[in-house]
Every structure is written in C-alpha cells, then in structure tokens.
Image (cartoon, rainbow, N blue to C red):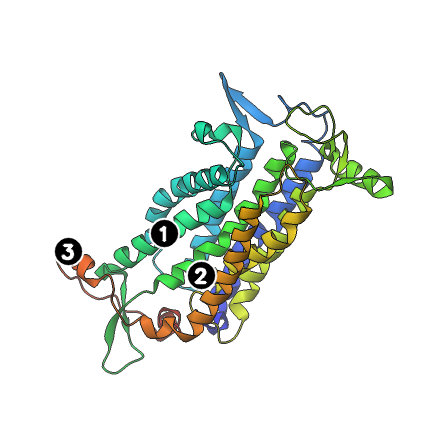
Amino acid sequence: MNVLNDRKSFWQWIAITAPFILFIPLLIFILAVTVLSSKQYDPDVTNVAFKIGSLSVAWYGIFIFLGFILAIFIGCIKLWKVYKCPIDPFYWYCIMGIPGAILGARFWSCCIGDAQWNSFWSFREGGLAVQGGVILDVIIAMIYFPLILKKPKYQVRDELNEPAVVRQVSMWVYVDAIIPCILIGQVLGRYGNYMNQEVVGGMIDGEYAKFIQNLFPYMYIHDNPNFTGPNGVYQPFFFYESFTNWFGLVFIYFIGELIPKKNCGDLGLGYFLWYGILRTIMNPFRYSQYAFNAGSLTFSIIWLVAAIVLIVLNHTVFPNLRKYKIWQPICNLFRKNKKEDTMRTNEQMLYYLGR
C-alpha cells in the first residue's frame, strides 16, 4: 500500500507518533546520564527507582513497562491512521501477548544460561531474552489473529472486484503494524541495563575512556559484586544497541512504508531481519559476562537466515497460499450467525488485499 494515497491520514500519523519515537528515547537518555547518574553507584540502591513497603521497583522494570506502553500506542496509531483496521483485536491480543512476552523471554533466558531454571519465577533478579518473548508472541498471534479476524464484524467487502466479495483482513497487516514496534521496548529497556551496570563492552582507556566516563558515569564499574571484570571504564554497549535499535525502528516503522512494491508482512519480517543482523554482528563485542554462548550465536544466525527466506517466500509463495482457508473448519465452530458485512472504501481496501 502507498501511504501517500491518503495524505491527511499520513501526516496525522507522522504528527502523532514521531514525537514519541524521536523525543522520548532522547528524554530517557538525558534522564539516565544526568539525574539518574548524579550519585555514586551503589549496586543495592542505584538500580531501585522507589519502594512500596518492602517491594522495590527497579528502573529496569520501569523502562520495560514504558516500552510496552509505547509499543502498544504506536502500533494502534498505525492500525488506525495508516491501515484503517479495527484496533480492538490488538487490544485483546495484548492481554495474551504481554504475559507471553515476559514468560517467553524468561524461558529463553534460562535456555541460554542468562538465568537459572530454579529461579524461573524470580523475574526481579533479571534475565529476559527478547528472542524468546518474540517467538512465543508470534506463536500466539498465528493462532489468535486468523481466528479473531474471521468474525464478520472484522471482515471487509472487496469493492475493487465485480461482483463484490467479502474478505478477511489479512493477519499480515497486523504483523506489519505490531512487530516493528517491539524495537521501542528494546530501545528503552537498554537504559535499565545501564542502571544495573549490565550489557557492557570491553574495557577502554585514554581520552576516549574519560569521554565515556563523563557522558555515562556508571560505565566506570568498580566494586560491583555482580560484575566479574576488573575495575575500570567499559564500552557503553547498552547505548550502542539502544541507538542502533532506534535507527532500525525509524527505518522500518516510517521509511519502510514508502518502499515501493512491498507486500503485506514485509515490515514485520524486516524486524526479524534487522534483529538477526544486529545480534549476529554485535554479540562478539560484548564483555564475556554478557555475551551469549555459541548456541545462542548460532540461533541468531539461524534467525537472520530464516528472516531472509521468509521475506523471499512472502514475495513468491505466500501470496498464492493466502486463498487457502486453513482455519475455516475451526472458525465455523465459533460462528453462530452472520452479521452484515462491513463496507469499506476502495482506498481502505488497498492494504487489506495486499496490493
């Protein structure tokens, strides 16, 4: 779909979402390197934002929560203003997807050795690997969206064909709107790692070390019982990953919509391609305590190759398979009656049909 077909909605979409995507990460950056870094680092105190009785609320959790909220918000705006799809299926998906993301991330973190199985439910101890959360949420989405979009109120009448036919909104439309928004959570979540003095690169010295210590005071790590390396200034790897993910978000979420001859699903698959490239390239440069093992690196390469294959299939095989109604027998069990078909304009049908 060419988003410029509806210029009014296009500029409304830009005006609403751009400030959040461009300026909130900047504000978090300023907050982290100034106010939050103004005191000497204490492993038992600095990473805690506030307490409610005996419950400590960590900065890491706050940044992750803020990332979830922003991802849901910008995903809804794209569905509403760009794709003109119903938003409420996404709301219901969030009820399953958010717990699924946390459980999947925790499960994968235990698989790669970033957390221990005997402390699986101790989320406050850290250890959430985003790959697991994304994979579990994709599985949930592949089951949920084909079922929920079968409801008559979410179907659309194709006015571009004669005679008019009723079609289901493609699941791939929601893939394009939702999956790239995960990157905003990864952008903000890395500042939680900064407050924990986690996800750093190698030790540095000289003038560059002084510059980094002035910009990111907590990158001077000393007397931290949770860190296995010697005292010194370390590469702010959390910032490198945060910035590159922010760049990927801007490219996929905004610029990706302007790419000609793209198919439904390309932007969602573009996230997997981006993350596979980023993880494969950057993992070897992490400090050994935070570098994933060989098995995880292999998985990142598989992730990258799979993304490339799926994008190719999305332009060759998948368009021909969309006419097969795999879920029809199951969906018919939940359809008690048929409602009036929703009428949509030709412009609104463009993306639904994958044109």
Left or right for 232, reference 151: right
- Residue found at the far right of this picture: 207
Q: In the image, residue 280 lies at what x, y percent?
A: 60, 54
Q: Does residue 332 sit above or below 28 in this rendering?
A: below
110 or 236, which lies in front? 110
Comparing labels 1 and 2, the label whose residue is closer to the camera: 1
Comparing labels 1 and 3, the label whose residue is closer to the camera: 1
Q: Which residue is mark 3?
A: 333
Mark 1 and mark 2 lie on one chain; the one further toward the N terminus is 1
As shown in the figure, which amino acid type bears the numbered disc 1? Ile
Quarter of the image where one finds residue 247: bottom right
Comparing labels 3 and 2, the label whose residue is closer to the camera: 3
Q: Is residue 355 visible?
A: no
- What secondary structure is found at the residue carrying circle 3? helix
Q: Which residue is mark 1?
A: 139
- What secondary structure is found at the residue carrying circle 1? helix
Q: Which residue is mark 2?
A: 176
As shown in the figure, which amino acid type bears the numbered disc 2? Asp
